[in-house]
Image (cartoon, rainbow, N blue to C red):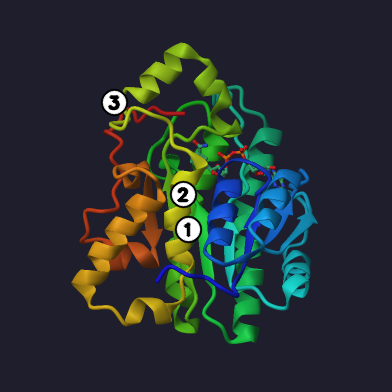
Amino acid sequence: MFELNGKVAIVTGCNTGLGQGMALALAQAGCDIVGINVVPASETATALERMGRRFHDIAADLRTAAAEALVARATAAFGHIDILVNNAGIIRRADALEFTEQDWDDVIAVNLKAVFFLSQAAARQFIRQKTAGRIVNIASLLSFQGGIRVPSYTAAKSGVLGLTRLLANEWAQYGITVNAIAPGYMATNNTAPLRADPARSKEILGRIPLGRWGLPADLGGPVVFLGLGRRVLRHRPRARRRRRLARTLSHQAGDPGAESIFTLTGNAKRSLQRQTVIASSHRPPPAGGNSQ
Ligand SMILES: NC(=O)c1ccc[n+]([C@@H]2O[C@H](COP(=O)([O-])OP(=O)(O)OC[C@H]3O[C@@H](n4cnc5c(N)ncnc54)[C@H](O)[C@@H]3O)[C@@H](O)[C@H]2O)c1
């Protein structure tokens, strides 16, 4: 049921972290992968080759690269594209009173502007191909909370949430679905300073019922599910489909409780919102919504 054989997925920022975890999961499900990376993705390339999948890496800085040209190169690599995962992201931490214009512009450029223009370029390609493309954006808990000391990150990730909803509305008519996964606290470079600070780490883990940081592999099940074409989802009776989805998401995350590490939003949220399977189990933050 959860197969993506013959599909091509673009994953931005797949040399490490969550992008690498999702690229490996998509490849495991059958996809060939096109990476868009500012840092060479040699470790990912080796892992994908071992799995027998094709990998094409495009070197680009998403602060400045032209999205249309990137998608054209990605399409040329394997002849078509089916899935875009807008994963690449950066974070800059400083008190809002001291925050610089550079830290604002860089984060907005990678985490929000590139997400929109890559989505636009991919959607144009899906329409040219006449295929039901899949776009998965990586949002954040800070799409829903304020956080502290990360103003451009919170603004960008809140923007990703709204943008995902808008694009889901506009492009459903073309058979293109647009969804976002909003991870909680994951053990990657992004959170290294938080994990290195014993007081912050303790405070953060205290709000996570599972009592652990999320892992890149936790997003494997969700991204594969959101990458599936419509045909696969149509032919199953609803209740059975939901039970199977619940089991598969849990098992692919390697932890029966792992669905609580992320939240989904976009087209998928609408069809799944009556389920209890997908929910953020992060306890509400104290008044003021502090995190990060
Ligand atoms: N780690 C978390 O707790 C967490 C939580 C919520 C959301 N996220 C989001 O998940 C995504 C992946 O982050 P991660 O946690 O794996 O962190 P990471 O720092 O390990 O990975 C970020 C990726 O983005 C790439 N990147 C950065 N700047 C780039 C640029 N200018 N051009 C092209 N690529 C660039 C990096 O090379 C890297 O591959 C990000 O969008 C991040 O905001 C992370």
Residue 174: where, in percent of width, then height?
A: 50, 83
Kindly tell me whether mark 3's CB lies below 8 Å from ligand 1.
Answer: no
Separation of marks 1 and 2 at Cα, in angstroms: 6 Å
In this view, 41 is above or below 128: above
Residue at image point 42% right, 63% down: 225
Residue at image point 53% right, 55% down: 25
Kindly tell me whether mark 1's CB lies below 8 Å from ligand 1.
Answer: no
The picture quadrant where one finds residue 161 is: bottom left
- Label ID, residue 219: 2
The residue type indicated by label 1 comes to Val
Which residue is under mark 3? Answer: 286
The residue type indicated by label 2 comes to Leu
Separation of marks 3 and 1 at Cα, in angstroms: 30 Å
Q: How crowded is mark 1: few (under 14 residues within 10 Å), some or many (20 or more)?
A: many
Foreground pick, 228 / 98: 228
- Label ID, residue 223: 1
Among the two numbered marks 3 and 1 on one chain, the one whose residue lies closer to the N terminus = 1
Is 161 positioned to the left or the right of 90 in the image? left
**Label pair 1/2, CB-CB below 8 angstroms:** yes
**Label pair 3/2, CB-CB below 8 angstroms:** no
The residue type indicated by label 3 comes to Pro
